[in-house]
Amino acid sequence: MNAEIITIGDELISGSVLDTNASFLAGSLRAIGVEVTWMTSVGDDESNIKDSLLSALERSDVVIVTGGLGPTPDDITAEAAAKTFGRELVLNKEALNRIKELFSGRGLEMTPNNEKQALIPAKAKLITNLVGTACGFALREKGKLIFFLPGVPKELARMTDNSVIPILQRENRELVKFKTATLKVFGLSESKIADLIRDIVERSEPAKISFLPNYPENHIKITARGINDQEAIKIVSKTADGIAEQLGDYVFGRDNQTLEGVVGDLLRSNDHTIAVAESCTGGLISQRLTNIPGSSDYMKRGIVVYSNEAKVDLLHVPAHLIDRFGAVSADVAERMAEGAREFGKTDLGLGITGIAGPGGGTPEKPVGLVFISLADEKGTVVKSYNFRGDRTQVRLVTSETALDLVRRYYLNV
């Protein structure tokens, strides 16, 4: 069974809104063995919506359409569907009552244009929306299923899990099982990864290996199909383990793991604490570390020392070091890490200083020059880097590199 996803909305094709619905739907369908072979985005244009629906119907077993089910004049998906398949647009009383209940429960007055959301093509099956006012519906044409869902991600996700997936599972109980695993890599380029695992890719016939750049990381997704869950899991695990062994410590996590989460686990398991002093990253590293629930166990201080005065006043970086070597230097980074550790009374101190750009660089110290320092009770390590990219990219890769330096501290590499 193959599927096509059609996302509707001028905001999608203009690039003003990121289409996360297609990604969510593709993952949900693949998990039950439905392969997505087409994805289409179309604006709020009746003729284009009609063409997309007819094309999808010709080449796909299942079609899932999102967006255009709201109360405003540009929400025309239900009307376009009715016209495309030669059906009347009728008022669904169950949907209308549900909308009225939602407004009443929220203490709001329902306006006439909201009744539009209860209009669906004749003989379509209602898909109840428990979160919002836009109802969904499903219809069958030429023996194929077409689902229409609202474009609000939270509403779509719940309706997919509660209604669409169970319907598809009942439709075909012999679906092949799919399982996936994702390896997360930092420190190797996509081309280098491809070269290192070429042999695995060439002999991974039961599994599909995809490369997913996610700057500054590279993710490797392994997908396997089997006649049951156990077979699919076995194939995925074997392939993932082989890749992880080949790439070694450049693999920092799997699936939903994040680098900051991995670092947090290492700090906690070693009963260690950390303080972070940031200049060019402006608190990004502290933000990432504290995104993890329970991070107060190990994250004790996050200090943004953007100015020279702050470095001197808060971290006691000697002013003569800044005068002699500059704020962006190995000497200052070293004192920042040590000052953070002393200020926070922690096991580790992390110090970061650099030039994120776009200005501020010189021939001797170009944009992208960054010093990262890590201090413990035995001493301090300082590393220098020359990163490329715009300001956002330099700050992001700096935060990633700093966290990875802490990770590797515990790996002794």
Image: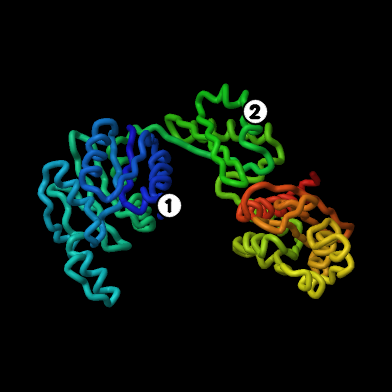
Residue furthest to the front = 363
Residue at image position (40%, 42%) is 26
29, above or below 276, in the image: above
* Real-space CA distance between mark 2 and mark 1, rounded to the nearest whole angstrom: 32 Å
Dot 1 lies on which element?
loop
Is residue 166 visible in the rendered structure shown here? no
Pointer 1 residue: 18
Q: In this view, does 216 lie above or below 395?
A: above
Quadrant of residue 154 within the rendered picture: bottom left
Q: In this view, does 14 lie to the left or right of 143?
A: right
Which of 146 and 40 lies nearest the eye of the viewer? Answer: 40
Residue 16 location, quadrant? bottom left
Q: What residue type is labelled 1?
A: Leu
Position of 307 relative to 231 (above/below): below
Please report the residue visible at 26 percent of the width from the left and 39 percent of the height from the top: 52
Q: In this view, does 90 lie above or below 143?
A: below
The residue that label 2 is drawn on is: 195
Query: Residue 390: percent from the left, percent from the top?
Result: 62, 51
